[in-house]
Image (cartoon, rainbow, N blue to C red):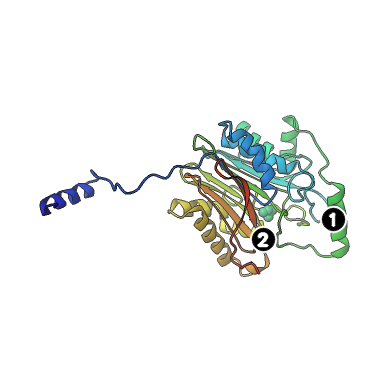
Amino acid sequence: MISRRQLMGATAMVAAGQITARAQPKPTPVRPLVVSTWRHGLAANEAAWKILSKGGRALDAVEAGVRESESDPKVGSVGLGGLPDASGQVTLDACIMDENGDCGSVAYLKGIENPISVARLVMENTPHVMMVGEGAKQFALANGFKEKALLTPESIKQWEKWKVEHPDAVKHREVNIENHDTIGMVSIDTKGNLSGACTTSGLAWKLPGRVGDSPIIGAGLYVDNEVGAASATGVGEAVIRAVGSFLVVELMRQGNSPQDACRLATERVIAKNPDWKEFQVGFIAIDKLGRSGGYCIQPGFDYAVYDKQMGNRMVTAPSRIPAK
Ligand code: GLY
């Protein structure tokens, strides 16, 4: 039997930090891992996995991954084939962030199919974080990007239909549905380093000049290599007000799981927007252990998760408004 003296001695050693609790086995981190928003995330994850599975860097994986959606004319919310603003112009927003906290961003970029790669170039080849509009386009062209018409027959058809239905009005907000928004992608590589990317053509039929959350570091995307990474989808104005992705990462820093952090950040968006029932916002997140999660306001948001154990699959995010 343990004597009182032994017990007191052991207690004193625990208090002094000489004995640590033995019963807590360290969880094995899931690596590599890539998570991205919406069903177009499946194809994007495949492209990212080609790099991750060979031991490549998460930064290269997220760039290659979201380029897949940008270049797919069938994805009507990103890059080529993205739906235009009210005046019929396609304007693109994107940002990227790596394990060192370095980041790059472009906004209101016209005529360039892969804005994410321009954002990476801003990060790596300039002293700046964000470039916009004509300056960003000239920077891209000067660095070898080719100008391309981003409207497709399908996006022109949809814009013409919208114009007929809304001759005087701009529809500012739209509840996003499957396959109809930003791609945000977050990843952890075999070395345990995190990166993220986010790219969109923004809200369809937006006022010309409007920029959403996707190119704004902290709103559409945030990465902290000590903690985790998060990205947002949905109505950008509401995400910006809550500095959504930064908030998700800070909530993980406080000890919340990625799932709980996404839920709590969504609750903050709800608290800051009295009309929250009228629009969609969703978050995805991963942490340093390779745990992932997602949460949204409206039912219907799903995200793609790819790891070695379970392969590439869709996960339906729980929503604040329950599914019917
Ligand atoms: N989340 C995309 C946008 O609002 O532009």
Please state which of the two labelled residues, at mark 1 or mark 2, is closer to the viewer.
2
The percent position of residue 31, horizontal first and vertical second, equals 51, 39
Q: Quadrant of residue 52?
A: top right
Q: Where 227 falls versus 266 (above or below)?
A: above
Amino acid carrying mark 2 in the image: Gly
Q: Earlier in the sequence, mark 1 or mark 2?
A: 1
Question: Residue, x 57% and y 33% (percent of image)?
Answer: 57
Across and down, in percent, residue 270 comes to 58, 65
Give the camera-side residue of 228 and 147: 228
Disc ID at residue 158: 1
> Is 7 or 209 nearer to us in this picture?
7
Q: Residue at x 52, y 54 (%)?
A: 248
Q: Position of residue 40 (x, y in %)?
A: 70, 48
User: Marks 1/2: CA distance?
Assistant: 22 Å
Whether residue 123 can be seen here: no
Residue 93 visible in the current orientation: yes
Q: Which residue is at 20% across, 46% downward?
A: 13
User: In the image, 118: left or right of 24?
Assistant: right
* Mark 1: secondary structure: helix
Q: From the image, which quarter does the C terminus lie in?
A: bottom right
Residue 91: x %, y % from top left: 76, 47
Quadrant holding ligand 1? bottom right
Mark 2, other Cα within 10 Å: few <14 / some 14–19 / many ≥20: some
Task: Indicate left or right for 187 with 178 as reference.
Answer: left
Residue under pointer 2: 300
CB of residue at label 1: within 8 Å of ligand 1?
Answer: no
Q: Is 6 placed left or right of 38 in the picture?
A: left
Q: Secondary structure at mark 2?
A: loop
